[in-house]
Image: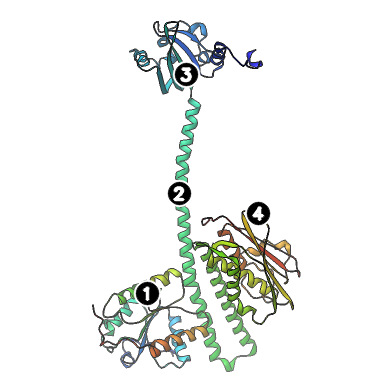
Amino acid sequence: MPRFILPSPANVKMTAEAAHILLAEDDPADVELALSAMQTMGSHHKIVVVNNGEDALDYLHRRRGWKGRGASHPALVLLDLKMPGIGGIEVLRTIKNDVRTRCIPVVIFTSSGERRDVAVCYENGANAYVVKPVEFTSFVETLQAIGHFWTGLNVPPTRSVRPQR
Amino acid sequence: MLRDMPLPPTADPEISYKRLFESSQDGIFVLDFNTRRIVDVNPSICLLTGLSRSCLIAANPESIAPLRALFRSDGSFFEEIKADPIFRRENLSMENRDGVRIQVEAVCNMFHFEGREFIQCNLRDVTQHRLAEDQVRRLNETLEQRVAARTCELEGANRELEAFTYSVSHDLRAPLRHIMGFVEILEKEAADKLTEAQRRHFLTISGAARRMGELIDDLLAFSRIGRSEVQKVRVDMLTLVMEALDDLRHETKDRIISWKIQDLPMVTVDRSLMRQALVNLLSNAIKFTSKHSRAVIEIGTELGRPDEDTIYIRDNGVGFNPRYSQKIFGVFERLNNADEFEGTGIGLANVQRIIRRHGGRVWALGKVDSGATFYFTLPRKCQNDS
């Protein structure tokens, strides 16, 4: 029996209305570690997992399998950079270039802190850049801090506030 | 005979001229402008044409095959020299006495003597000279091509290295993260079923993974030093030392170290790179005196070459075998047992790379159990990135 049930279009309805995090991550081991970390810290916020860039954008725009999801934006998109197909930077660019999605906070969550990645991400409007710690304890603490800040301390943008063109 | 005698102070101009004429490497002949016949020749023109003096004298130069290149049958040579008394041809091609094509440079000029007009023609064989010129030109061309090709290769290699480190940085960390994460999860889940030995195995796995993570990080930092731009500023070395010590306060807080810091010079360095080099050198000194109850670390300058500053960092720690004084600057080289002193062994490789990028040198002196001194030099003149 799988330890973690990954949210899918079918079971997302029950979680979508709560303050939730969209995790775009293609590596199943990283997904499992992230969910395990959330469980370890007894997190109350929900995580919706998508495994590639296309799916992340479909989720945000309520397209394809995500048509039935709740109307609220995630409080945060936690975005991996290296993904097959549409990579993290392109997802970031698409989110930040679209008035409908550009106010959603995006935190880059990736293996490497290579300077040029950091630079490109900030240039394209990333709200934060976090390197995945190699040690599990730090990994848990990092996710805890991210969750605590973005779904707790931070006041997320609401859909009623429409950015002016 | 003349050759063996010192020249008289007031040399007879006629003798001087004759000496020059006879000994010249240029082939020289004199023409009577009116008769257009050769009236005098020197030995070199005989060699050049392969004809004796007697054959040449009174001959019409147009009838002598090797000289024909100079005289066109239309007589234009004589018209030209009449109009302009200095006649020059740089690329005449003629046949020498062996029938071999040679390149000749000709300078002819008209002069008057006792109411008559003469033309002196100097012919110089420039075949070897031209060949050498051609060769130099060709070498230059191929050199440029080779430089361009090599630059292209180097750029390619750099791009590959860049891609390689990028990939290392991204892709090597993920599996380590998975090893450590799942080992921890597994350990927690099986906590009550694990024997002491099994718990130790888990510790070994996580320890090894953590160490590999450190090695990867250090290697990436090392590679970054090689690629980053060096931006030099004028700064007081003492300030940099103080900043480095501030970075290291965590490592010194439980230690009693007697610091002896001399006056240090102003230097022209990349601030962050030099600070990193100092942090590495000082943390080394701090680390290898840790078993010493009275650690003394000294930072100073030594007189060296006038065009550079020589700075040293001396400690009274465990020292090293002088046989390995070069080896310690290698990547991941360690002279001590891993469990005795922490570290991946990249610090001194970083130092060497940073100092070399500044155009300086680095070396170490030491003995087992009697401390070590690390020296580095920095050029005084402001240099561009090397």
Please tell me if label 3 and label 4 are on a single chain: yes
Could you tell me which chain the residue with mark 1 belongs to? A
Q: Quadrant of the C terminus of chain A?
A: bottom left
Q: Is residue A87 visible?
A: no
Residue name at image x 47 percent, y 63 percent = B162
**Disc 3 designates what residue?**
B123
Whether pointer 4 and pointer 1 mark residues with C-beta atoms closer than 8 Å, the reply is no
Labelled pair 3, 4 in contact (Cβ < 8 Å): no
Disc 2 to disc 1, how far (Cα)?
36 Å
Amino acid type, mark 1? Gly
> What's the amino acid at mark 3?
Leu
Position of residue B128 measured from the top left corner of the image (x, y, whole percent): 50, 27
Specify the farthest residue to the front.
B10
- Quarter holding the N terminus of chain A is bottom left
Residue that numbered label 2 is attached to: B149
Q: Nearer the viewer, residue A149 or B219?
A: A149
Labels 3 and 2 within one chain: yes
- Graded by Cα atoms within 10 Å as few (under 14), some (14 to 19) or many (20 or more), the crowding at tag 2 reads few
Mark 3 surroundings: few (<14), some (14-19) or many (≥20) residues within 10 A: many
Marks 4 and 1, how far apart at CA: 54 Å
Foreground mark, 2 or 4?
Answer: 4
Asked if residue B92 is positioned above or below residue B296 in the image, the reply reads above
Q: Are marks 2 and 1 in contact (CB under 8 Å)?
A: no
Q: Is residue B358 above or below residue B172?
A: above
